[in-house]
Amino acid sequence: MRHTSKSLFFLASLAFAYIFPLVSQPKSITILHTNDMHASFMPHEATWVRETPKPMVGGFNELSFVVDSIRKINSATLLLDAGDVMTGNPITEYDYKGAKGGALFEMMDRIGYDTWCFGNHDFDLGQKNLLQLTTIAKFPTLSANVVNDKGEYPFNNRPYVILDKNGLKIGIIGLMSRDLYSLVNQNSVVGIKLLPPVATTQKFIDELRPKVDLVIVLSHEGAEDDSVLAVNVKGLDVIVGGHSHTRLKKPKFVNGVIIVQTGSNCENLGVLDLTVDNGKVTKYNGLLVQLWYNSARPKTQLSAFIDSVGQGIEKDYSIVIGTLKQDWVRSDTESGIGNFIADAQREAARADVGFMNSTGIRKNVSAGPITKRDIFEVLPFRNILVTFPLSGTQMKEIVLNYIERHLMIQTSGIRCEWKRDADGKVEIVMLEIKGKPWDEKITYTGAASDYFMGEAKRYLGVEVPHITYLQQEVFGAIEKKVSDEKVIDSKVENRIKEIK
């Protein structure tokens, strides 16, 4: 039988492939990523820009436009989110498909996310709401170290997912901050168990590594803990991070691991280009794309949906409820806005003293009209007002802790003058509680948020075992005080003052 030239070539090719196995070709993948969007689905002012009027930045329409533009020139892309989709905009107060904030996940479905891991603020409206959000999401929910007390994954979360893209198998592990319990309202984490991040991550890296070309951790831990993770695990390629709102213009490279994060509030899209060869990243390049608002963008079904939701919120939350005589400016020390919030909580609870953590005040407000939206953006959390007893001894101890440890809290109902003696020791010269001299024998009533009291030891320096939950949200107490007073002139009063 005669062989044709084609068949001879075919046989020669087979022999060559047998003797000299084909070398795999490097493959590329682009990771698009967001984190800590905090419900910022609409554009907002770029507050860091000095010019007036300030340009607008962010929002899901801009995000979608940039993502689609990149996909049109590069189909080998994945879109990931590292948590805290919720809390920060009134959209999280509106029901959609059975979940408050559900419209955000409808928008993310339409943008085409591939997977996400939840963050601590995604627990703010409780476990039932988070579970419903994960049913609206058509993309997988990841969190390897969040289980219930039976060791089950309770929020449709998986420890990892394997995605195929451009001939690459990509394993993605989800991870929650080890500080979850101190970051979330205690009622929202009842029955939730947090597994050790490093050990849990290594376990699933070891499980994934033989099956995939690339291992990514989608982390809601923060940039510092991401670096710690990179140092303490083996076999990891990339960490797409969140939680700390770190704006990494270029990726960090720690112990052979690439670490990226975009900042917050949907102001940037992270873009990470990777070249992978034989299960190793051989080349990488990362950057942030600023999502500047452009009113000339073509209208789409997504933009129509975004506009309809935004218009409904604007109608409800743009009502003016009061007037502010001078700017409210946040501070770690006493501030006018902090005094007002602490006073409102004390008055609403009919307590002797009130407290507010300074870091829980999330926005400055300029003098002029105050809307319901302003109050929501100052206090975007669904915290419950609580009361608790404080002995006279504890009351004085809190004041001393405030002075000596520089506690970052705002107070109400406390007036104190103090000085240092020749040895530098704090001496209380005058201490009044609700206008009356402090009495060691009196049991006082304090008021604060349930979140604050979940961290009482950190914020006050004392343990408070007995807490009463009131049927009122902190937001409602603040809104009512603004509405009742109409004209607000809160200022710094030196409530705890050093004298010479």
Image (spheres, rainbow, N blue to C red):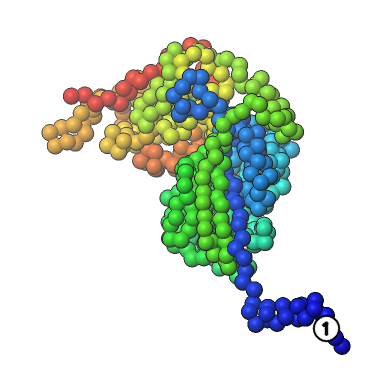
Q: Quadrant of the C terminus?
A: top left
Tag 1's secondary structure? loop
**Residue that sits furthest to the left in the current view:** 422
- Give the residue at mark 1: 3
**Residue that sits furthest to the right in the current view:** 1
How far from the left and from the top, in percent, is residue 303? 70, 31
Q: Nearer the viewer, residue 484 or 446?
A: 484
Residue 212 falls in image quadrant = bottom right
Q: Residue at x 37, y 32 (%)?
A: 332
Q: Residue at x 12, y 33 (%)?
A: 422
**Residue that sits furthest to the bottom in the current view:** 1
Is 408 on the left or on the right of 38, as rendered?
left
Is residue 479 positioned above or below 244 on the image? Answer: above
Tally the marks.
1
Residue 315 can be seen in this image: yes
* Amino acid type shown at disc 1: His
Q: Residue at x 63, y 48 (%)?
A: 79
